[in-house]
Amino acid sequence: MNNVLQLVWLVPFFPLVGFLINGLLRKQLPKSLISIIGSGMVLASFIVSVLLFMEVKNGNTQVVNLFDFINSGTLSIPFAFQIDQLSSLFLLIITGVGFLIHLYSAAYMHEERSEHFGRYFCYLNLFVFSMLLLVLGANYVIMFIGWEGVGLCSYLLIGYWFKNTEYNNAAKKAFIMNRIGDLGFLIAIFWLIAKLGTVTYTTPEGSGVFDLYNKLTRTDIIGITLLLFVGATGKSAQIPLYTWLPDAMAGPTPVSALIHAATMVTAGIYMIARSNILYTMAPETQSVVAAIGLATALFAATIAIKQNDIKKVLAYSTVSQLGYMFLGLGVGAYTGAVFHVMTHAFFKALLFLGAGSVIHAMHHEQDIRKMGGLAKHLKITHATFLIGCIAIAGIPPFSGFFSKDEILAAAYEKDHLYYYLGVAGAMITAFYMFRLYFTTFWGSFRGTEEQKHHLHESPAAMTIPLIVLAILSMIGGFVGLPEVFNMGEHKLEHFLAPIFEASTKAKELVHPEVATLDHGTEIMLMSISVGVAVIAILIAWARYIKKPELNEPAGFGKVLADKWYIDELYNFIIVKPLNGLAKFMNSFVEKRFIDWLVNGVGRTVNYTSRQVRLVQSGLVGNYVLLMVLGMLALFVVKFFLKK
Amino acid sequence: MIPVLLIVIPLVSGLLAFLIKQDKSVRVWSLLTSIITMVVAVAGIAFIHKASYFQCDVPWLPSLGSSFSLTMDGMSKMLCLLTGIAYPGIFIATWNSTYRNPHQFFALMLLMQTGLMGVFVASDALLFYFFWELALIPAYFLCSTWGGERRVAVTFKFFIYTFIGSLLMLVGIIWVYFHTPDHSFAMSSFYKLNLPGAQQGWLFWMFFLAFAIKIPLFPFHTWQPDTYEQSPTAVTMVLSGIMVKMGVFGILRWLAPVVPVGLWGYGDPAASMCVIGMIYASIVAMQQDDLKRLIAYSSIAHMGLMGLAIFVTSSVGIQGVMVQMFNHGINIIGLWIIVELIERQFGTRKMSELGGLAQKAPTLAIMLVIVSLANVALPLTNAFIGEFMMFNGVFGSKSSNYHYIFMVVGGISIILSAVYTLNMLQKVLYGNTSTLTANAKDIRGNEKLVLVVLLIGIVVMGVYPKPMIEATRHAVDAIYSKMFVKLP
Amino acid sequence: MLIERYIYLAIALFCIGIVGVLARRNAIIIFMCIELMLNAVNLLLVAFSKMHLAAALPGKANAGIDGQLFVFFIMVVAAAEVSVGLAIIVMMYRNTHSVDVNFLNRLKH
C-alpha cells in the first residue's frame, strides 16, 4: 500500500470488530479478555489515527471511497471517508481519550457480571465506531449515520442499568431530544440535495457543497445553516435541547466521560466547524449561534452553582463549556472552538474520571454534601482533579486558559458585550468548579463511618488514565499558544488553516479593514479573565473551605438548584399536551369518530334493510296488490306521462 | 416461466395440503413447497437475466380481450422475493403454534400466497383483479376461523371494507376497458390510453379508494388494528408484511401510470391524507397498550409515508418506496415474530403486564431492540435507506406545491416513532420483572434462526442497499416516465 | 259487431279477476279469479285476431292466426298451472287445515 491514508477504514473497523466480538461472545469470554479486546481495539485505531495524523501533517489529505451507499439516478451518496486536518485531529481526540476511558472502565466496571461487562464494552466500542463514522464521513449523510449512531449508543449506555426506570427515562429522553435535532439536520440535508444535488463536502472537480455554496440564495443558506444548527443544539446540548445531558448522568461514570469529552457532544461543534464556509456566508445564523452559545454558557453555569451531585455539576459545566465553543463558532473563531474541543476533551474526561474515582471510593455515593476531606485518602485523584479544575477555570498555563481565551478574544473583536458576558460566565465557572473541589476534597469527612473505613485510592488502571489526562490538561494548551507570547506561530491554527481557508478569505473579502487585536489589548483581555477567575476561586475558597453548604437551598438558590424549572416547563408545554392529545385521539377521534363513521355505514345499511324488510310481509295478498299497483303505475307512465 | 411457477407452486401445494390430514406432515409439506417457491423467487432476481423467462401470455377470456399474461419487472421481482422469503420464515417462526384443522390452515395460507404472487406479476387488469380477490378470500377464512375472540365481527368488517374498495376498482377497470381502442384489459393498452382530465379525476378516486383501504391510509385504516389484533399471528404477518404492499404496488402499477393527470390533479389532497395519517397514527400509537395494536398503528404511519412519497411524484421518492416496501415487510414480520413469541410464552400482549424481559431473555431483548430500531429507521438499518429516499423525494418534489410542508410535518413522525417505540421497549424489556415474566425463558431453535436471518438482512440491506436499488431502478424509471408522458 | 264490446267484456272480466285475487282469502277462489284473468286475455286475443287483423288483411288466409295460437299456449300453461296450484292448495290444506291464504305468511319469518 503506497498511501497510508487508504488505511483510514481501519480506524472505525477496529472498534466495529470489538463491538461484534464482545457483543456476540459476551457470555463466553472472561472479563479480562473482554476488556483487553474492548480497549485494545480502540488502542489499535488510535495507533492508526496517529499514523494518519502524521501523514496529514505533511499536507496530504484524501477522500477514500469505500462503496456506493445510495445511488439512484439523480441522487448519489458514496460511503466515503474524508481524512484531512480536521478529521484527523478529531480522530486523535476520540480514539486517544476514548482509549483512556476504556482502560479506566475495565477497572471501574469490574463488579459487573461477565455478560453485562461484555455488553458494556460492546456498547462503548459501538459508540466509538459511530463517532468515528461521524467524523470521517465525506458527506453529510455519512455524518448523519454516525450522528444517529452516537444518539443510539448514548441511549443504550445511559440506560445501561436497565432495571432502574428513572435511568430508562433518562435514556429515552436523550434519544428523543437528539431525534428532534436530527430532524433539523435531516431537513438541512434534503435542502442541500434539492438545491445542489449533492451532500459531499468537497470534490477535486469542485462539485461539493463547499465548492458550490455560491449557488445558494440567501434564504437557502440561512435556512440550511439554521437547520444544521438545530441538529447541533440537540447533539451538543444547547438551549433549548440541552436537558437530556444532565439527565444522562444516569449512565456509568466512564460513559459520562465518553459522552462529554471525547464523543457525542463535540459532534455539533465538529459539524459546524466542518461547514464553516456555509456559516461564514450566513452572518445572521452566526449571530444566532453565538447568542445561543453564550446564553447556554451562562445559563448552565448558574445552574451548576447549586447542584450537589458531583456528576450533575460536571454535566452542567459541560453544557456551559459547549456554549463557549458555540460562541467561538458564532464569532468566527473556528480554530478557537476546535481548540477548546480538544482541551475540553482532556480536562473534562479528567474531571469525570476523577469524579468516577471518588464515587468508586465512596461506594456509589454522588452527593458532595456527604463527602469532604477526601484529599488525604485519594492523593492521585485529588491532585489530578485539582489540575482539571484549574484547567477549566482558565488559569495559565493550563490548557483551558489558551483555548477559552482565544474564543473570548475573538468574541471581543466581534462585540464587546459577548466578551463581558463570556468573562462573567468564566467567573461563574471558576466559582462552581472550586466549590465542587473544596467541598469534595477539603474540610472533614461527612459520610458514614463505613464509607470512611473503605476510602481507598483507585487501582492503577484507573489512576493511569487520570495521570495521562492531567498531563495533557497541563500541556495541551501549548499547541495553540497565541502569537502574542512571541513563541512562534499558533501551531493549531496553522495546521487547521486549510480547513478554514475559504472562510478566512470570505471574511477578508467582507471586512478587509478589520485588523486583529493589537497585542496590548490582547494581554489586557487575558489579564482580566485570569484575574476574574482567581477572584472567583478565592471567593469559593473563602466560602466553602471551612463551612460547606449542607442545607437545602432557598429563595433564588432553589430556583437554580431546580434548574430554573425548565424540565417542568417542557413537561407542561410539550409532554403533557402531547399525551393528552394522544389520549383524545385514541379514545375519541379513533373510536368515537372515524370508526363510528365507518361502522355507521354498516349501521345505515342494516337499518335500511330492516325497514325495507317490513314490505316482505309474507301475505300473498299484499304482494299481489303491490304487483297490480306496480303494473298500473307502469301503465300510467307508459301511456300518459311519456311525452 | 418464472411467474407461472410462482403462482402454480403455491396453488398446487395449497390444494394438496387440503388432503394431508396429519399436523406434522402438512407443516413439513407447506414448508418444503414454500422453500421451493422462495428458491424460484430468489433465482428470478439473482441468477436469471433473460427477459423471456419473465413473460407469459396465454389467452384466457379472448372474447373479453383478457389474457393470462404475466410479467415481472424489478418491482414485481422485489415483492415476489419478499413473498417468497416471508413464507418459509413465517412457517418456521410459528412452527410451535398449534392450530385446529392444520391442513386447512396451511392450505389457505398457501392459496393466499398464490393470490399475492398473482397480484404482483399480473399484467392484465382483469387478471390483477382476479388475484387481488383471490388473496383476500383465504385471508377472510383464516382470520375468521383461527382468530381471537372478536374475530367474526372484525373479519367481517375487514372483508366488507376491502371488498367495497375492490368493487370500486373493478368499476374503474371496466370503465377504462371500454375506453381502450382495442377493448383489451392488457396493461399495455391501459398505459397507452389517454383519457380526458375530468374522467381521470374520478377514476383516480375510484382506484385510490381501493388501494387506500388496502394500504391503509388515514381515514380508511380502522379495519387494520382490529384485524391485526384478532388474526392469528402468522396471518397478521402475511397481512401486514405483504398484503398491504398490494395497495402500494397497485398505486404504482395501475393508478399512477393509467391516470397520471388525475394523480397530478389530486396528488396534494391524497398526500395530505397520508401526512395526517402519519402523524395521527403515530400519536395514537403512543396510547396503545396492546403490542399488536401498537405495531399496527406504527405500520399505518410507515405506509402513510410510502403513499406520500408516491403522491408527490418524484423519482427518488418512488425509488425509496420500492426499497421500503421490501424492507418494511422484513422489519414488520420480525416484529410480529417477537410479539408471537411473547404472546405464546406469557399469554398476553399487554405491555403493562410485561417488563424486565431484558434480564430474563437477553437474546429476545436484543432482537426486539434491533428490529425496533429498524422500525424507527435508524441509519445502517434497512428502513433508513427507504425513509431517507422517500423524505428526500418529498422534499425535492417538483410537482407538489406543498412538498416542504409535507416533508416537515411528516418528519415529525420520525420523532414520534422514536417516542412510542422506545416506550414500548422500556415497558417490555426494562425495569423489573412482573409476575408473568419472572420465569421467562429465552428464545432458541427455529425462532432464533429466523430472527437472526432477518437481522442479518436488516443490517446488510442497511449498509449495502445498492443491489436492491439497482434491481428496481428500471422499474422506477419506467413508472416515473409514464407519470409524465401524458401530461397535457 | 264492434270490437269495443269484446274489449269492455275482457276488461270487466279482468277487473273482476283482480278484485277477486286481492279481496278474497280463499285460495280456491283466488285460483279461479286468476283463471278468469287469463281467460279475459284469451278473449281479447281471439277478438283481436278475428276482428282486427283479419279485417285489416282480408286477402290473407292466415291473418291473425298467431293470436289464436297464443290462446292455445295460454290454455296449456293454465292447465299446467291448475295442476301445480291445486297440488299446492292440497298441501296447504293438509298443513293448515284451511285454504285461507292469510295463514301462509310464514315467508315473513
Image: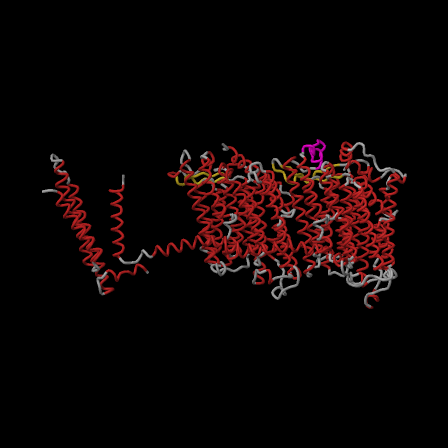
Is residue B259 positioned above or below A129 on the image?
A: above
Looking at the picture, how far across and down is residue A263, in whole percent?
75, 48
Q: How many marks?
A: 0
Instruction: Give the camera-side residue of B109 and A223.
Output: A223
| Quadrant in the picture for residue A478 | top right
Task: Using the rendered image of the protein, determine whether residue B481 is visible from the camera's viewpoint.
Answer: yes
Question: Magenta stretch mostly in which secondary structure?
Answer: loop
Task: Confirm whether the magenta stretch covers residue A206.
Answer: yes
Q: What residue occupies the far bottom of the structure in this picture?
A: A449
Magenta highlight range: A201-215
Task: Using the rendered image of the protein, determine whether residue A51 is visible from the camera's viewpoint.
Answer: no
Instruction: Give the camera-side residue of A111 and B51.
Output: A111
Q: Is residue A189 left or right of residue B184?
A: right
Residue at 55% x, 59% y: name it.
Answer: B96
Is residue A487 positioned above or below B112 on the image?
A: above
Q: What residue occupies the far front of the structure in this picture?
A: A555
Q: What residue occupies the far right of the structure in this picture?
A: A486
Q: What residue occupies the far left of the structure in this picture?
A: C1
Q: Is residue A244 left or right of residue A335?
A: left
Task: Confirm whether the magenta stretch covers residue B134.
Answer: no
Looking at the picture, how far across and down is residue C98, in whole percent?
22, 64
- Colour theme: secondary structure
| Quadrant in the picture for residue B434 | bottom right
Looking at the picture, how far across and down is residue A521, in whole percent?
87, 40
Is residue B311 positioned above or below B29 on the image?
A: above
Looking at the picture, how far across and down is residue A620, in whole percent?
26, 57
